[in-house]
Image (cartoon, helix red, strand yellow):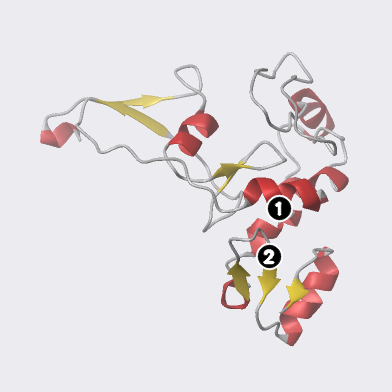
Amino acid sequence: MRYLGYRALPAGNEIGLSIPIAIDAGLGELGRMGLLVTPKYGPRVRLAKVITDMPLVPDTPIRFGVTEFCEACHLCARHCPSKAISDGLRTWEGKSSSNNPGIFKWYIEPEKCYDFNGFSCSNCKRVCPFNKLQVMASNLKIRSSGGWMVKKVSPLGRKCDKMNGTFFKEG
């Protein structure tokens, strides 16, 4: 950007929260575990921001079923050893002083996560079915009706499904 004559400033969370900006930019949706979930990489992403005066065409938020899936799934909350991830319904109320209330979402308690294992044990990422989409991509079909179906489940896919406790249906 600088070589093209535009300003480019790296920005941390003190300038703007990365996850809401990424959601507004159409990179993914917010998952139950408080992380950005992308269609390609699930919750396995690292975010960075660049503030620029370069004229860019803005993107728009996307919807691909994360909220609806997380409402039924609960795997990240069940596998969180510190109980930092809500197993309940979305709310407008924060749960800790680290939360930014006023957004309808699942609030996490990051202090519990940090106290338990430094900065992250990553169980939530490990068990998230969106983490496995690339592995099972040829078998998955997202239906606009909100249902997740396995079109044609391979023996390995069935075995992985049983091991991970997910609830894909054969169709």
Q: Secondary structure at mark 1?
A: helix
- Secondary structure state at the residue bearing disc 2: strand
Residue 11 horizontal/vertical position (percent): 40, 24
Tag 2: amino acid: Trp
Q: Residues within 10 Å of mark 1 (few under 14, many from 20)?
A: some
Q: Residue at x 80, y 63 (%)?
A: 166
For residue 77, side relative to residue 28 (left or right): right
Q: Earlier in the sequence, mark 2 or mark 1?
A: 1
Give x and y (percent) for residue 91. Answer: 75, 27
Q: Are marks 2 and 1 in contact (CB under 8 Å)?
A: yes
Residue 10: quadrant of the picture:
top left
**Is 113 placed above or below 126 here?**
above
| Residue closest to the eye, 167 or 1 | 167
User: What residue sits right under mark 2 in the picture?
Assistant: 148
Q: Nearer the viewer, residue 18 or 74?
A: 74
Amino acid type shown at disc 1: Phe
Q: Where does residue 141 sit, x and y in percent of width and height?
A: 60, 71
Neighbours of disc 2 within 10 Å: few (<14), some (14-19), many (20+): some
Quarter of the image that includes the N terminus: top left
Could you say which is closer to the camera, residue 114 or residue 149? 149
Alpha-carbon span between mark 2 and mark 1? 8 Å
Left or right of 64 on screen, residue 97 = right
Identified at 57% across, 77% down, the residue is 138
Say which residue label 1 marks.
Answer: 69
135 on left or right of 156? left
Q: Residue furthest front?
A: 145
